[in-house]
Amino acid sequence: MKNLLVAQSGGPTAAINATVAGVVACALSSGKVDHIYGAVNGIEGVLAERFVDLREKLDSAEKLDLLAQTPAAALGSCRLKIREREQLKQIVEVLKKREIAYFIYTGGNDSMDTVDKLSAYIAEEGIEGIAVMGAPKTIDNDLMGTDHCPGFGSAAKYIAATFAELERDCHVYTTKCVTIVEVMGRNAGWLTASSALARLNGGNGPDLIYLCEKPFDTEDFLKVVEEKLKTQDSVLVAISEGIKDAEGHYVSEQVQTKALDNFGHAYISGSAKVLEQIVQDRIGCKVRSIELSLMQRCAAHIASATDISESRMLGMKACQSALEGQSGQMAAVIRKSDDPYTVTFETIPVKDAANAEKKVPDAWITPDGHDVTDEMIAYLKPLIQGECRNICENGIPVHIRLY
Amino acid sequence: MKNLLVAQSGGPTAAINATVAGVVACALSSGKVDHIYGAVNGIEGVLAERFVDLREKLDSAEKLDLLAQTPAAALGSCRLKIREREQLKQIVEVLKKREIAYFIYTGGNDSMDTVDKLSAYIAEEGIEGIAVMGAPKTIDNDLMGTDHCPGFGSAAKYIAATFAELERDCHVYTTKCVTIVEVMGRNAGWLTASSALARLNGGNGPDLIYLCEKPFDTEDFLKVVEEKLKTQDSVLVAISEGIKDAEGHYVSEQVQTKALDNFGHAYISGSAKVLEQIVQDRIGCKVRSIELSLMQRCAAHIASATDISESRMLGMKACQSALEGQSGQMAAVIRKSDDPYTVTFETIPVKDAANAEKKVPDAWITPDGHDVTDEMIAYLKPLIQGECRNICENGIPVHIRLY
């Protein structure tokens, strides 16, 4: 028996399930795989042997399509970080017991760390016949080694469309008003940058865009907002949740506790709320803050067709590479050109992606620190192209449940 | 010359521009109208004679379609309430000067009050040849005299799809978590009720739905949430922004004791944020709050085709009725049956809609106070049907600008 196991990890996205659909489609068509299992809740589910039979759950092309349009992680997720060799031993015991020859793990840099450690352990222990492959996924787009990450394009499309709509909404009254919209991104500003795409069809989009890569200067921010208010009624501002001052303190720390999540990340939110209060105090005009919150990562109803298609392709690539005997690698998108947009799907050593963060290059942020350059737009624009035209029933998109 | 003037008022919606598209289409096809003007920023724009030429701005069917898919008020809006007879006199002077024979005003109950007062003034003063008609619009769905309001169905569709996505997102981890989502509605819970439509395709949707029509009992809420946490990982809660306790105090008025910003201000927040803090203090599990904020009223990218179509029809009805000499009336949707869904478009005396609020009937809220009944679902379901398949360019929907 040569069985395949796929599992999902890290934060949900609108595209991660398309990767699983790609893995399953490739396994089905290969004729080389017996059981196709999904582990529920990532590595936690592997350790607990919480498996679902994906041949049974996904027994038609339509179900694969429904999976690809279902947001979040249909197999559940986890944030378990591998810290001990004993955990790797336990995982391998489960894989052996279930006769898993191919294990595909989708996720971000923490998940790629798991793929790296697990494949290294298997090699070091001289264990034969278990290939471990990674498939990238993160709305943050901060993975190294791949041009971009599945999930990012759909989140970027939601953000672009939403900023275009918010700009229209904020424009209707003559009362002066500042609207500050907080976008996900603790350390990388890719998502916040995608708010600039709201301008592609002639709209004004956000007036100011602050990424977390540049120190945030509150006094300069207030000066620029006041200047804009002299000539326009509405000032729309996009900020990364993780904007920090010159000393490296999160703007949001001004009201947040110092809670840490399981990976030791500072638990933050509320930068926009803090700035709302500051604008109210110092400028005194009408001001409101908005958080795009979970909606930006799960808005499958406006997923990017490019993103969903590439996400499937990366799942197929990861599966195909495992079937060919590769291990310790991650499927990746390599961009050949922006316009026309062309890419290839390749594999890279997973250790190149594990635990690293790809930030926005300084050259793609305007010198004044509150906008992005044309190079950034050229990079982002292809990733939001195409509408998915999801299968809807009763007025809302249909989702599939695997457990 | 017999000219037509159309203007928009009140809060933006995803459908209000479709009403203007309907008015203009009817005026164009009638052959009875010379200039077709739009006043910028509602009655304020009428008084200031800020007019745009809509024959010129909307000189093709495609532009009318683009207008119908553009969110917010393309002619701008205002919140001016008529308080003095002098204002009515000034408005009529402008209408006479510009040879306006037909004035169509779209908006909510305050705007219908303007239509009522203006048409009454014209009748009382014996002024001939000026017909004033109202067309309904409000995401709150709280207008009397019409089965429902343009804008509501699209907001409800966004809310239903978003809750379905959020439910998927909240389900991925095994960590117990409460997610509290605040929906617009200070006095009427129609929008919050529409979160129940997230269950139409077999999803669990929100576990608890609290409308502002029923007193909110915090202790009972905590008890129900704790009970649910015993058997499920994720508890998703929908609340109206305007939920109040038994004494009539808004939940959002409760001051958060712990969170002060650097300036020592109390952290002023919405109802969901207040409940987040209470759940954290009293239950101690992971909890987060989300506000659907402006997105719910301007998400034209997921507008209801039923809503947009009806919104156009109501604009046509208002225009047609004005051309036929009616005045002081509001175009309205009258429902004939839920399934199959059939409606007629009629006119009602605008005074029946002015200044009144239609609340959710008590019988459509479950006796336990935290869900809605099948009658509510039967009422809501037809309103979100149909996908608009908006014209997109560069990966985002195209919007039109009229000024």
Image (tube, coloured by chain):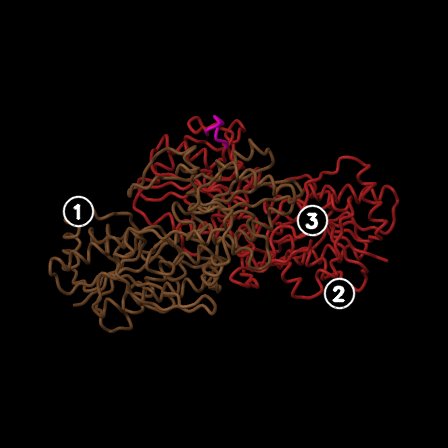
Chain colours: A brown, B red
Say which residue label 1 marks: A84
Say which residue label 3 marks: B8
List x then y, in percent, for residue A361: 41, 53
Image quadrant containing the N terminus of chain B? bottom right
Report how far apart the C-alphas of labels 3 and 1 lie in the structure.
64 Å
Mark 3 belongs to which amino acid?
Gln
The stretch of residues the image draws in magenta is B262-268
Circle 1 residues within 10 Å: few <14, some 14–19, many ≥20: few
* Residue at x 58%, y 34% (from the top left corner): A283
Circle 3 residues within 10 Å: few <14, some 14–19, many ≥20: many
Horizontal arrangement in the rendering, residue A327 relative to residue B376 (left or right): left
* Residue at x 33%, y 66% (from the top left corner): A22
Q: Chain of mark 3?
A: B
Residue that protrudes farthest toward the left in the picture: A126
List x then y, in percent, for residue B291: 49, 42
Q: Is residue B118 magenta?
A: no
Question: In the picture, residue A57 is in which quadrant?
Answer: bottom left
Mark 1 belongs to which amino acid?
Glu
Tell which of A137 and B227 is nearer to you. Answer: A137
* Residue at x 34%, y 62% (from the top left corner): A19
Q: Chain of mark 1?
A: A
